[in-house]
Amino acid sequence: MKSYLKKSLVLILFGFILHILFISYFHVGMLWVFDRETGANDSVNTVLLHTDTATSDTRGLKRPSSDVMYSICTYDVKYKPLIITTPIPDSYWSISFYSKNTDNYVTLNDLDIENKYLKVYLVGINSQPKKVSNGMVVVSPSDTGYILIRMFIGNGENMQQLKDFQESLSCIEYNDI
Amino acid sequence: MIIIRKYIIYALLIIGIAVAFTYLSVPIYKNIVFVKNDIWSSVPSLGDPKRSIYTRAYVATYGLFALSKPESVYFSADHDINEETLDGLSCYILSGNDIQSASVSPRWWSLTVYDDDGYLVESSEKQYSYNSENIIYNSTGNFEVYLADRPAGNIQNWIKTPTDGLFSVVLRVYQPGEEFFSNLKRVDLPIIEKVDC
């Protein structure tokens, strides 16, 4: 009886550990699907995609907002920092930094940025640049991750202007380190 | 052979127990973490790096890249005021006050309908959502949105729901301010009522 109880407890313990592992790494599977559908693996340290507003054909990301235009950069700052530059519209705009486990570790919005122009040095733990000029520094807690830019479309009157802002976005490696 | 069979049975039992823990953890997680405001449920800071592994898994399931406090808060509703699941076979009116005109004033908000898989519902009008700038308010400053698979003559705001199948509504509120965050259970949010089609 004791042996049976002991075996049951061991099985429950292993079952619980497996459950915790599954929950802990579930996002990895979802990111794998996202990367596959967007081609993120082939487009590191560059602008991955710009989207018009989401439609019923939009896949890759569940529950997209159809009131926002997205731009996405994927990054790997293990060896070199990334510089992100873009002009900023007068309407709501935000840039969100996600580590490789999808944690949103920094978000800046249009009200945080002076002169309506963003210049951010995204650096890794071991890729700190010697000097930075005229820009903010954001430290990524992981070597890889994602950057999402959201632009509110409002009543849709300024869509073309917002698209021009999208096209001006640049995510490039910073080589002067 | 008998030993191998024994270990296969153990492995299957462990997987079964893990599935049971996962299955049981969903309602427990929702009861503990979700903030309820009438028909709406919310997790206050979905994208926060300090979130639990369960919240991270929840976000991965429902949207992957969530914002965190103070940038945005997300509310989700999958039932009406009579606690009945939102169903594409029925018709509903979502009605509310302008969230921006409340004592707490977010920068902007939006209401979006998603099918049961979490995607926007196919619509020839491509009107998947309304936001604080494109919604049509009535003369008293309130709004109504008709949720059904075909438009109603007397309500200008219409979002198509699935012809059959369940759906949910997500309310996103951007830069709502600290007061809004500290009153998530009490802030005045829209209601969803079933009506005759």
Image (tube, grey):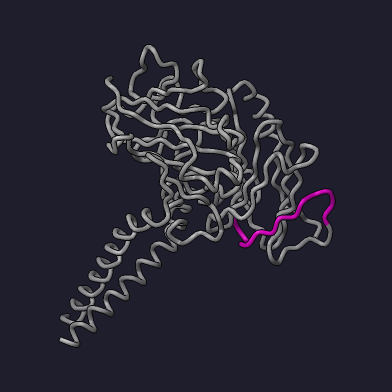
Is residue A154 visible to us here?
A: yes
Residue B67, position in %: x, y?
56, 47
> Residue at 53% of width from left, 51% of height from top?
B45
On-image quarter of the N terminus of chain A: bottom left
Q: Quadrant of residue B102?
A: top right
Inspect the magenta stretch and tell me whether residue A133 lies in it. yes
> Residue at 42% of width from left, 51% of height from top?
B34
> Residue at 51% of width from left, 38% of height from top?
B172
Horizontally, residue A40 falls left or right of residue B190, namely right
Residue A129, position in %: x, y?
79, 60
Q: Quadrant of residue A144?
A: bottom right
Depth check, front residue: A167 or A119: A119
Horizontally, residue B192 falls left or right of residue B184, namely left
Point out the stretch of residues depicted in magenta: A132-145
On-image quarter of the C terminus of chain A: bottom right
Residue B137, position in %: x, y?
51, 19
